[in-house]
Structure formats: structure tokens, C-alpha cells
């Protein structure tokens, strides 16, 4: 019952053609449709119509959308969101292309969260019967799927409370001012069995820090770095290791300045996974385990 997983992110870009070159030719996503000024994209191993939507209009996050297990979950989650003191809006079928009826709310942080149950299923090229491990003609980084997103909020504690108390997310890792403190400065939240589906760090409200695509392993990550150089994509940080999530990572930017990440590894989570705590003085080590410090861009460049 409840949230199943991160379904899609919708982001603004400055130029749709540049964005297509980036996300299709370099990241390797498949375009499933282009309609009414929006490009619908998915990784080769994703079954639903899209996991990323790009639209022209600057940079930043339009919304994050989570898929729920059962259609009936939407009514219960609507009740919970309202009980939490937030307004709920209905999203009608076809208001969002290829997505069924749903609900959305704007968090105090300004982020729009949409919940839905149905999506048009387009399937994968490898299929469900006796599949090959990957399809022919993968492009660029060949990203199989969207993994997570990270946003900034002035009050990460409040943002986290919405996800844990209302949507039943669990916290895999958190940053606190000092050992023993209950005050959450940053949190990594999951509903699936990965270290995070969504995460929050302190910063301006409504901003996107990055969204990430999963890659199978460190070799794929290194190859993704090669693709970035080949396509003259600005690399922010990496390849390196996160202390938090233990993932392997490269951060890079799309042509509009939105930060992307390719992410591999990381542990699995489960219902009784204990929350790991980092103290604020160790945040640099938590984010970049090798360098043990944050670079200026990491905290200041948001879209
Ligand atoms: Fe990430």
C-alpha cells in the first residue's frame, strides 16, 4: 500500500533541441513521444511511457511524480496530505500525457509532488519473455533507468516529515547538527529497496539539486565519463564515491544547467533498515568520500 516508487521527474530546459541531444544522444534515453512542447523520455529498462519529461522554459524542476501501488491508495493519501495541512489538487487523466488520474500538492518548500497509479506501458526492447540482458543499439551512457532526485529546502526537517509521516518513506541516512540531535539538516528517503528515491539538503526552497540515472557498475560509470567528454558535457564532480549511500557517482550538467548524476552501486534497503546518521561536520566526507570536502559548486549551483 502507498507509494511504490519515483515515477517521473518533469524539468524545464532552455532549449528543447539541445536537451534532446543531451538526454537522447549522450545520456542514452529513448524518446517515447514529443507532444505539445514536451519531450517524453525513458531509460531502456523502464516499462512505463516516461520517467523524464522536459519542457522549454528555463531550468529547474516542474514536479516530481510518484507511482502508488493501488488506485485506492490515492484517496487515502489525499486524506493524509490534507490532514497534514496541505492543499490537494486533482490531476485529471490526460492533463498529464500517458498518466492516469492522480493528485498533487505543493509542499511548504515549494516543490510540487504528484501521485498517480496508472501510466501507459510501452515496454522495453528486450521484453518480458526470455530477454537478452540489454538491447542492441544503446547510445551514449545507455542509462537503463531513473534512480532518484535531490532537492533543496529551507527547512529540510519539515520536508522530511512530509515524506515520512504522510507518504510513509523511511530515512536511510540523515545529517544532524551534532551526534544525538533530532534536527534533520539533510535526509535520504526511500520507499523502494535502494538507498534513496528522493533526498533533501538545506538550501533555497523549490530548487532542484540533481536527478540521477542508474548505471550497472563502476565500468559503466567510467564509460559515461568518456561519453561526457566526447559530447563536451561539463562534469561537476567525479567519478568518485559517496560516503552516504556508498554509491559511485559522476555529477554533470545538462545544457540548461540542470545537474544530472550517473549513480551505481549503493547498498539495498528494507523495512527494518536502520537510519545511518552523519554529523554536519562530516558532511563533506558523506557526500564525497575521497576528497572529504564539498566543492563550492555542489552547494551553490541549483536550478
Ligand atoms: Fe544523487
Image (cartoon, rainbow, N blue to C red):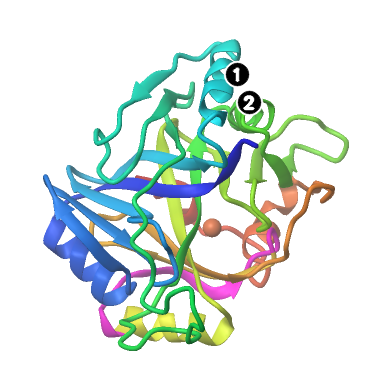
> Quadrant location of the N terminus?
top right
Residue 207 in the image: state x and y as whole percent: 40, 38
Q: Earlier in the sequence, mark 2 or mark 1?
A: 1
Q: Looking at the rendered structure, which numbered label has been put on residue 100? A: none
Q: Is residue 242 left or right of residue 88?
A: right
Residue 231 among those drawn in magenta: yes
Q: Could you tell me which residue is drawn at 33 percent across and 45 percent down?
A: 10
Dot 2, crowdedness within 10 Å: few (<14), some or many (≥20)?
some
Residue 161: quarter of image: top right
* Image position of 77 with respect to 222: above or below: above
- Residue at 55% x, 37% y: name it: 70
Residue designated by label 2: 166
Residue 222 highlighted magenta (yes or no): no
Q: Quadrant of residue 228?
A: bottom left
- Front position in the image: 206 or 10: 10
Structural distance between the alpha carbons of marks 2 and 1: 6 Å
Q: Residue furthest right?
A: 180
Which numbered disc covers residue 80?
1
Span shown in magenta: 230-245
Numbered disc 2: secondary structure = helix
Ligand 1's image quarter is bottom right
In the foreground, 3 or 101: 101
Residue projecting furthest to the front:
129
Q: From the viewer's perspective, is residue 131 above or below residue 17?
A: below
Residue 267's x, y, as percent? 72, 65
Q: Is residue 162 above or below residue 201?
A: above
Mark 2 touches mark 1? (CB < 8 Å):
yes
Classify residue 200 as left or right of residue 64.
right
Amino acid at each position: 500500500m502507498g507509494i511504490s516508487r519515483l515515477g517521473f521527474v518533469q524539468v524545464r530546459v532552455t532549449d528543447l533541441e539541445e536537451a534532446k541531444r543531451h538526454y537522447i544522444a549522450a545520456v542514452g534515453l529513448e524518446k517515447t513521444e514529443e507532444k505539445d512542447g514536451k519531450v517524453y523520455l525513458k531509460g531502456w529498462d523502464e516499462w512505463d511511457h516516461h520517467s523524464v519529461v522536459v519542457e522549454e522554459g528555463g531550468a529547474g524542476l516542474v514536479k516530481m511524480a510518484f507511482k502508488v501501488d493501488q488506485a485506492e491508495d490515492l484517496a487515502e493519501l489525499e486524506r493524509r496530505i490534507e490532514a497534514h495541512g496541505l492543499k490537494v489538487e486533482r490531476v485529471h487523466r490526460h492533463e498529464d500525457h500517458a498518466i492516469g488520474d492522480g493528485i498533487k500538492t505543493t509542499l511548504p518548500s515549494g516543490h510540487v509532488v504528484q501521485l498517480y497509479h496508472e501510466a501507459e506501458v510501452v515496454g522495453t526492447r528486450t521484453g518480458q519473455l526470455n530477454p537478452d540482458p540489454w538491447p542492441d543499439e544503446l547510445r551514449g551512457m545507455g542509462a537503463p533507468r531513473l534512480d532518484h532526485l535531490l532537492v533543496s529546502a529551507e527547512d529540510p526537517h519539515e520536508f522530511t516529515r512530509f515524506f515520512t509521516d504522510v507518504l510513509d518513506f523511511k530515512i536511510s541516512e540523515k545529517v544532524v547538527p551534532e551526534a544525538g540531535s533530532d534536527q534533520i539538516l539533510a535526509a535520504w528517503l526511500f520507499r523502494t529497496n535502494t538507498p534513496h528515491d528522493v533526498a533533501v539538503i538545506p538550501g533555497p526552497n523549490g530548487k532542484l539539486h540533481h536527478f540521477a540515472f542508474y548505471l550497472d557498475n563502476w565500468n559503466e560509470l567510467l564509460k559515461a565519463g568518456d561519453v561526457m567528454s566526447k559530447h563536451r558535457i561539463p562534469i561537476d564532480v567525479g567519478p568518485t564515491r559517496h560516503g552516504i549511500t556508498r554509491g559511485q557517482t559522476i555529477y554533470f550538467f545538462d545544457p540548461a544547467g540542470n545537474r544530472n548524476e550517473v549513480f551505481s552501486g549503493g547498498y539495498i534497503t528494507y523495512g527494518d533498515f536502520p537510519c545511518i546518521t552523519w554529523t554536519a561536520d562530516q558532511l563533506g566526507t558523506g557526500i564525497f568520500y575521497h576528497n572529504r570536502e564539498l566543492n563550492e559548486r555542489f552547494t551553490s549551483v541549483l536550478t
